[in-house]
């Protein structure tokens, strides 16, 4: 069947809604994104199929990720006119009991994450809530009310975890491709661009440039125009784009189709990290399905608009996240940035006008057109509209993906949704914006997260990575780690970045080895300013951020390393050693039993001793001690 009009989408959607909302069989959704598979979801799925199979009673399905990665594998079970219950840590050995328990109406509170109140997408307001009037299960929390999900508004993530990403019909059932067909029937490219401009949508890839302005500029230049999606997500700890690609690939295709229609482009390219094989697999399937339905290809829906789409996989170069380097790589050249005096909207891919946005940006576009610019612009802050997806990782209880309105405070994200710092340890800093982002201390936890506010404290939005650090983190070592990463990822084309980062790293290595000198802090600041001001591309201009912000907010740690030859956090091995506090030690013997060097000795219920000549500073004793008797000196 070839889609010709919106009513065709509605017809397909009605059929699929029965599967999604009123299934005749008990439905078991296994969250099968990369994070879930890594936690064992693949084995959970296989066990469920082996035990219950595909028959008249059960259907076992694969979906994307619901975001709460700390609780993976996640499994949702529901049936017609019955509750939708999400189970946490649903491993291979537990799934059989979980399904039997659901069927018997018995819900193990230790296994249940929550029950859904409303499974609909935000694009389905015209469709009644399938759970309306259903009595909730007593004493089981509503999923939307638990702290991790409580403040979230899912726009870019609206379908992740709810649909099978390899079934285009389920995407259509939740409002998919309607925005594109409406725009196609209206036939007003200027109106599309105006809607995106009025929404206030800014690029979610890091730069934050107004999306509508970029589209307008690209459409104004003559030549063969191209639409490019930057899916080369390279920030350590960031996986927002991967989750959307794996859980809702059609939202990216639809967003690119709308951009192509607005700009007058006939071809689109998806530049995806080669390290994302599942994302690539699901994109390939999605493109094939969209082509089969006539939503890609020649004369789409009987119109004069044609659009082809291709996938290109990157080779893992971090610098190819920069637009001009990405386009050079797409052309088969070495991925090196070029100077920005000529913009890519004028001369980009193959020297033609090219519009590049990232995954999350395109995922927002269909929702904006269907719900309206005013609806989107009412979310967020004056200068940063809508929502933003963040990946919460590091020293935090609830790792995962959250999508919150711009302006949500760091404290809300880290403590309400993230659950705070584990093991009752103190918060120290959070880095936003990837390896080129700044480290933000506790005094700014009330900061509302948007492009402007983060810039004021020396950090950046980036693509949305958040790495949380606790009291045991050495900020000098953190700066060294990220600078080492950026040194390896620099393309080496310009001297300030190639040589400046290398020299800064040499100074940091010296400080962490105990050979720091007076004046090193000032030298790092001088070098950082040079690299930031004179580098060719964004990698170099933002590379000093981790160093400059850690000096700005944690200068005392640098001074301790240089002057006192001490690492207060106990990370830089030449600058600390462990001792046992005899007053705190209860003689439980746990540290002695765990020590790989047999460096700890003592009688049971008596204070122990640690032989410094045997200690390799592995930290095992420090981690296992329940009485804080192991101290860093």
Image (cartoon, helix red, strand yellow):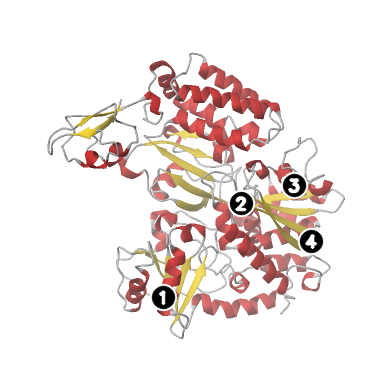
Residue 180 lies left or right of residue 99; in this view the side is right
Whichever of callouts 1 and 4 sits on the residue coming sooner in the sequence is: 1
How many angstroms separate mark 3 from mark 1 (CA)? 53 Å
- Where disc 1 sits, the SS reads loop
Kind of element beneath mark 3: helix
Please tell me which residue is depicted at 83% across the width and 46% down the height of the picture.
351
The mark nearer the N terminus, 1 or 2, is 1
Alpha-carbon span between mark 4 and mark 2: 21 Å
Residue behind mark 1: 133
Looking at marks 3 and 4 on the same chain, the residue that comes earlier in the sequence is marked by 4
Q: CA distance from mark 1 to mark 4?
A: 42 Å
Residue contact at pointers 1 and 4, CB within 8 angstroms: no
Counting residues from the start of the chain, the first of labels 4 and 2 encountered is 4
- What is the x, y in percent for residue 390? 52, 49
In front of the other: label 3 or label 2? 3
Query: Counting other residues with Cα less than 10 Å from the Cα at mark 2, is it few (<14), some (14-19), or many (20 or more)?
Result: many
Secondary structure of the residue carrying tag 2 is helix
Residues 521 and 134: in front is 521
Q: Position of residue 307 (x, y in %)?
A: 78, 63
Query: Height in image: 158 above or below 606?
Result: below
Q: Secondary structure at mark 4?
A: loop
Question: Where is residue 67 drawn, in percent x and y?
Answer: 48, 57
Name the residue that disc number 4 marks.
188
Q: Nearer the viewer, residue 487 or 209?
A: 487
Distance (Cα) linking label 3 and label 4:
28 Å
Relative to 539, residue 414 above or below: below
Query: Are dots 4 and 2 in contact, CB under 8 Å?
Result: no
Q: Nearer the viewer, mark 3 or mark 4?
A: 3
Of tags 3 and 1, which is closer to the observer?
3
Q: Which mark is residue 377?
A: 2
Residue ID for mark 3:
327
């Amino acid at each position: 069947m070839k889609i010709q009009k919106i009513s065709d989408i509605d017809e397909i959607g009605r059929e699929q809604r029965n599967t999604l909302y009123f299934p005749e069989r008990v439905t078991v959704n296994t969250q099968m994104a990369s994070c879930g598979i890594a936690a064992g979801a693949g084995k959970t799925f296989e066990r469920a199929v082996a035990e219950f199979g595909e028959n008249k009673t059960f259907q076992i399905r694969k979906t994307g990720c619901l975001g709460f990665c700390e609780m993976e594998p996640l499994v949702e079970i529901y049936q017609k006119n019955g509750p939708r219950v999400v189970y946490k840590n649903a491993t291979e050995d537990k799934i059989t009991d979980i399904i039997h328990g659901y069927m018997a109406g018995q819900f193990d509170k230790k296994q249940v994450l929550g029950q859904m109140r409303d499974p609909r997408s935000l694009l389905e307001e015209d469709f009644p809530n399938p759970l309306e009037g259903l009595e909730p299960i007593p004493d089981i929390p509503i999923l939307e009310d638990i702290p991790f999900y409580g403040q979230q508004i899912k726009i870019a993530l609206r379908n992740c975890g709810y649909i099978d990403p390899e079934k285009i019909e389920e995407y259509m059932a939740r409002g998919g491709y309607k925005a594109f067909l409406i725009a196609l029937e209206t036939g007003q490219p200027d109106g599309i661009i105006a809607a995106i401009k009025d929404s206030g949508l800014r690029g979610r890839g890091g730069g934050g440039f107004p999306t509508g302005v970029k589209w307008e500029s690209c459409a104004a230049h003559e030549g063969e125009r191209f639409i490019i999606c930057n899916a080369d997500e390279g920030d350590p700890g960031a996986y927002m784009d991967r989750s959307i690609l794996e859980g809702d690939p059609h939202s990216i295709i639809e967003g690119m189709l709308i951009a192509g229609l607005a700009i007058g482009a006939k071809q689109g390219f998806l530049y995806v990290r080669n390290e994302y094989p599942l994302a690539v697999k699901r994109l390939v399937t999605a493109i094939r399905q969209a082509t089969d339905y006539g939503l890609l290809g020649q004369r789409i829906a009987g119109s004069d608009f044609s659009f082809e789409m291709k996938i290109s996989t990157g080779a893992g170069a971090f610098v190819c996240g920069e637009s001009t380097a990405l386009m050079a790589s797409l052309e088969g050249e070495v991925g090196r940035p070029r100077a920005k005096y000529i913009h890519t909207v004028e001369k980009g891919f193959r020297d033609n006008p090219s519009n590049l946005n990232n995954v999350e940006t395109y995922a927002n576009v269909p929702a904006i057109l269907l719900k309206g610019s005013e609806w989107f612009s009412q979310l967020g802050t004056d200068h940063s509209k809508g929502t933003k997806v963040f990946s919460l990782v590091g020293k935090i209880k609830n790792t995962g993906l959250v999508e919150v309105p711009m302006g949500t405070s760091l404290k809300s994200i880290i403590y309400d949704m993230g659950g705070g710092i584990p093991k009752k340890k103190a918060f120290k800093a959070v880095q936003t914006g990837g390896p080129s982002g700044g480290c933000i201390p506790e005094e700014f936890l009330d900061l509302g997260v948007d492009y402007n506010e983060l810039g004021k404290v020396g950090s950046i939005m980036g693509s949305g990575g958040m790495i949380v650090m606790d009291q045991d983190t050495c900020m000098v070592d953190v700066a060294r780690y990220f600078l080492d990463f950026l040194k390896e990822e620099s393309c080496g084309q310009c001297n300030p970045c190639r040589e400046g980062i290398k020299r800064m790293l040499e100074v940091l290595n010296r400080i962490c080895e105990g050979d720091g000198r007076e004046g090193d802090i000032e030298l790092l600041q001088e070098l950082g300013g040079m690299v930031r001001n004179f580098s060719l591309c964004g990698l170099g201009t933002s590379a000093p951020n981790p160093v400059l912000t850690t000096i700005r907010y944690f200068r005392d740690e640098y001074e301790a390393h240089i002057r006192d030859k001490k690492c207060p956090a106990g990370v830089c091995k030449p600058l600390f050693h462990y001792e046992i506090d005899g007053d705190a030690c209860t003689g439980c013997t746990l540290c002695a039993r765990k020590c790989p060097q047999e460096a700890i000795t003592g009688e049971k219920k008596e204070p122990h001793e640690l032989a410094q000549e045997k200690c390799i500073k592995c930290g095992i004793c420090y981690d296992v001690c329940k009485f804080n008797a192991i101290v860093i000196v």
